[in-house]
Amino acid sequence: MRRVVRWRGFRWLVVGLLLLPVAFGGLVLLTDRPAPSPSGIPEYAMPLQPAQTEIDRELAPLLAAHPGQTGTVFLNHGIDAFAARAICTRRAGRSLDLQYFIWHNDLTGRLLAREILDAAERGVRVRILLDDMNAYGLDPHLLAMDAHPGIELRVYNPFRNREGVARAFEFLRRLFRINHRMHNKAWIADGRIAIVGGRNLGDRYFEANEQTNFRDLDLLLLGPAAAQASSVFDTYWNSDAAVPITSLGEHAPEALHDVLARVREDADRPSARQYLDRVAASQLIRDYYQHAIAPHWTSGIEVVADPPLKWNGGSRKDWLVGRLVPVISATRIRALVISPYFIPGEDGTGLLAGLTRRGVHVGVITNSLAATDVAAVHSGYAKYRVRLLEHGVRLHELRPYVATTAPPGARREGASLHTKAFVLDDARGFIGSFNVDPRSKDLNTEMGVLFDDPVLAGQLRAEYLRLTSPSVSWSVYLDDNGALRWLDAAQTPPVVMTHEPETGPWPRAVVRMVGWLPVEPHL
């Protein structure tokens, strides 16, 4: 009997070994080529002109009054962030260069598409670079936009197979490389104005979602730093990772006409009119048309980014993390960190612990389990929470709803943190796309603004204090027995909670189970 069992086991082993080449061959056939080849013609930012466009003419006296300096405007409200993109797109007369991780096909995504198409109709050259992972299912829309003679669209590190089982097999076959994504966010008009920060394009980033919106942050740049953003865009646009969308699909002859008609029709819908009325009433719009926008001018600012082919290795000094760690390590008094996806790892925990040992005040605001949109990331953060508190790091977790005195049952607007920034010694800081997590450090490409300027530092510190106020966040601490506690200081008297606030047992159990898995390097 044992011989029969052994023989059967051996037979199945032989069958399995014989099927392996067949399975691999099927995998190769289904996934076609390993990766699309970059076939785009090299292109670069259009030369700046003194007075060619409305933007040139509007900025000329400001730039002349502040030679060599960059004007900055803080965009910490979603409506203002949408308005800023709409204004500079309408004023653009030469070029629009857009680089994004996500562009949702929702209300604000389509409204911005309309602004871009209108600009292209005026003769503005439009280049759009999107990460391909989140462009899944959007090929008809992207190909239609690319069909416009004034618009060219490329995708970063794309799948050759665009849908179905073949795409899944390609993901498995190219797992190492396909896991590297472009997380950059930049909106550049005429090479003179750039909006750089944490926002993708979609309703949740622009306060248009009816349930939950992101608390996010961009910095609008006027002048030299905008030219730096253009240089970053060109590096990515002409890299081997950027592939024209036309090499992955074909234009349908009527597609552009249909998309133009659809986006213009969307703008006349009641929901769009209601949102655009809110934009028209925004502080930024009022200030712009009353000539009351007062940028802060500074020379202590630089746009920084990872290399586009980060997966090729090379010196980590060329990576964004290589620029940020020395800046943080040099902190002497205070380090305030805002990161929605906060997984410091052993190295980051050691860095922050080293700061507190030197007497530096270290504060962190991140998402609570109830507020996060990626529970797996919270599992990574939770593993370091006790150790960070033991080392004296002050932790705050964003509430899913702002604490108010509204009557029970009243509608509450949900919130989730998406800002990625830090401010050091009330003097230096960073605003951009970089999270304190392994993915931003090692896998994704990231982009942002490094500054050394007390005014910008003061604005960012005020944002940190707003986010960590009792009505917006819970304070996390260890009690006398070393147990985790959450303090709700918005109530009178303050309330202490013994588990993740506003969550049930099942989400908490899932987070614990995910924390047992060896997935941290990919979170």
Image (cartoon, rainbow, N blue to C red):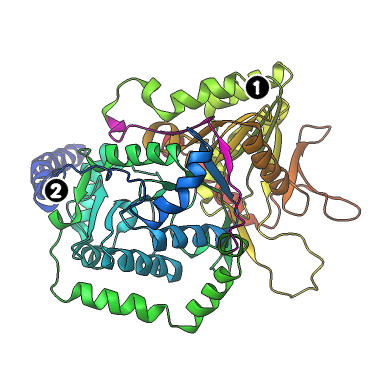
Up-down: is 251 above or below 474? below
- Residue 385 x, y percent position in the rendering: 65, 35
- Front residue of 330 and 373: 330
Residue shown at the point (35%, 66%) measured from the top left: 113
Tell whether position 83 is magenta: no
Q: Residue placed at 18% from the left, 55% from the top?
A: 161
The label on residue 158 is: none
> As drawn, is 343 to the left or to the right of 231?
right
Dot 1 amino acid type = Ala
List the residue tagged with mark 2.
Answer: 27
| Residue 286 vertical placement versus 218 (above, below) | below
Residue carrying label 1: 353
Q: Tell me, yes or no, if residue 358 can be seen here.
A: yes
Q: Looking at the image, which is closer to me, 104 or 34?
A: 104
Q: State the image quarter where residue 408 is shown.
A: bottom right
Bounds of the magenta segment: 290-311
Report helix, strand or loop for mark 1. helix
First reached walking from the N terminus: tag 2 or tag 1: 2
Q: x%, y% of residue 470?
A: 78, 50
Please tell me whether residue 293 belongs to the stretch shown in magenta. Answer: yes
Q: Which quadrant holds residue 355?
A: top right
Amino acid type of the residue that numbered disc 2 sits on in the rendered structure: Leu
Q: Residue furthest right?
A: 493
> Is residue 210 at least partly visible in the picture?
no
- The residue shown at (54%, 78%) is 274
* Circle 2: element type: helix
